[in-house]
Amino acid sequence: MSSSTPLTRAADSFKRAAAAVNGKIRGARTSGNAPGNRPGRSGKPGRSGTLHPAAVWAEAAGTAGEFLSPAWRKVRAVWLKFAWPVLSVVSLLGWVVLAAAIGLWWAGQAWGWQEAKSAAMVAFLLFVLAIAFIVGRSAYGVVLDLARTRVAVGDDAVGSIAVSNVSTRPLLPASLELPVGANTAVFHLPRMKPAQVHEDLFTIPTARRAVIVVGPVRSVRADPLHLLRRRVMWTEPVDLYVHPRTVSLGSSAAGFIRDLEGMPTTELSSADVSFHALRDYVPGDDRRHIHWKTTARTNKLMVRQFEETRRAHLAIALSTNTDEYDSEPEFEMAISVAASIGRQAISEQRDLDVLTQKGPLRCETGRNLLDDATRIVGAPMRKTAVDLARNLSDAVPNASVVFFVVGSHVTATQLRTCAASVPPGVRSLAVRVQPGAAPSRANIADLTVLTVGDLDDLAIVLRKAAA
């Protein structure tokens, strides 16, 4: 087994490129001297052997990249390990002052301006003094604690930062930065004695659905002019899930998906809980299902026949096409409606599938469902609610109840098309979200259309659907 180095691989690649170029040249000469071709001109038969400069440059670039990539990786690793930690300490203002100092010193040397030299020396002196503020090691013990990492929209997200001095000497006052999403909170630490603990509480606003990255907590040491800023990370970032607002529907509101005896089908079974009719006994039938009273009256063995039942399998199609919604609050209400129905189904241990234009959501637990619902991002797209309904019928063929959660811009014709994609025997309902509208129920063929104007009205309209 032979070992290879980047240099040998580059040499082999160069040899292959040279061989390919020589082959093309020989092919071009051969085709140019072939009968029927005039010298100095490339006729039609000889075009396949023409040498293209772009191919040569591409082969050369590939060879150079293969040769230089190991060196580039080493240089990048050295830069990130040694140079970048030092250069990142200098702030934007610090780079401006440093450039001005160099320019003033050069001007003073070139034209004999003593004032420019003096200003440059002052700038360099400020840099030297700024270094004294950021050198040294801080020994903090930092604990970031979020009371809850999952809250609903409107709930308080409370957390705390506990900082302790784990060194044997006092620590000077400093600042802590806590990134919260796109914003940054600043906490000021006093002078701390050894083993002293300082704790700060904070509250994160949860006005809208989002996944907020909290942290990492970092200490900041800077000079008074903020020419140099040194940051040290002390914790790992934590994801705060702000779930969509949901409402409890209750068993009466979700009565249309009850399965005390199962959802009936058109298939017959010899053993189930839903009695259908009597039939003649066939050898092999279970004798426990013989109806003895009828047998005594007809003098023939008669057995009970049952309708085959199945557990309710709920499927929810949530449209994330923002063109079908009138506003962002309407879209957020649609997500809350779908999450509320799905959460109710999971609490009643129903089989559940939730599908959007971008794919399915996890429905193993209510927590997984709400986590995925929090990450939903709406956007204008070509796929409409009709396309989503067709995908749902293919993705969940065994559904017994289907929900279409759509916006106010979805027309009755589109809803009728959605209902047509549902297999026969499957109950289909459409929840049309329209903030401010009165709760109502309507029918479009076999589709029940429920209009929801407020999330708190969802239980009302579902009771109307179950009536």
Image (cartoon, helix red, strand yellow):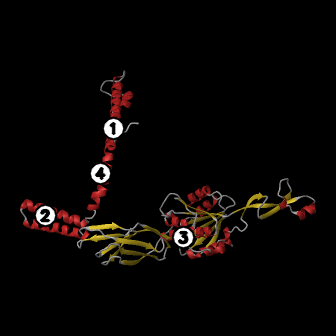
Mark 3 or mark 2, whichever is nearer to me? 2
| Disc on the earlier residue, 3 or 4 | 4
Residue 75's label in the rendered image is: 4
Q: Is residue 129 left or right of residue 71?
A: left
Q: Is residue 308 left or right of residue 82?
A: right
Q: CA distance from mark 3 to mark 2?
A: 63 Å
> Callout 1 environment at 10 Å: few (<14), some (14 to 19), or many (20+)?
few
At x 55%, y 73%, the residue is 246
Judge whether residue 54 can be spotted in this image: no
Q: CA distance from mark 4 to mark 2?
A: 33 Å
Judge whether residue 72 can be spotted in this image: yes
Mark 3 or mark 4, whichever is nearer to me? 4
Q: CA distance from mark 4 to mark 1?
A: 21 Å
| Disc on the earlier residue, 3 or 1 | 1
Q: Do residues under tags 4 and 2 come within 8 Å of each other at their CB atoms? A: no
Q: Position of residue 442 (x, y in %)?
A: 64, 70
What is the three-letter code of the residue carrying label 1? Thr
Mark 4 or mark 2, whichever is nearer to me? 4
Q: Which residue is mark 1?
A: 8
Residue 336's label in the rendered image is: 3
Q: Do residues under tags 2 and 1 come within 8 Å of each other at their CB atoms? A: no
What is the three-letter code of the residue carrying label 3? Ser
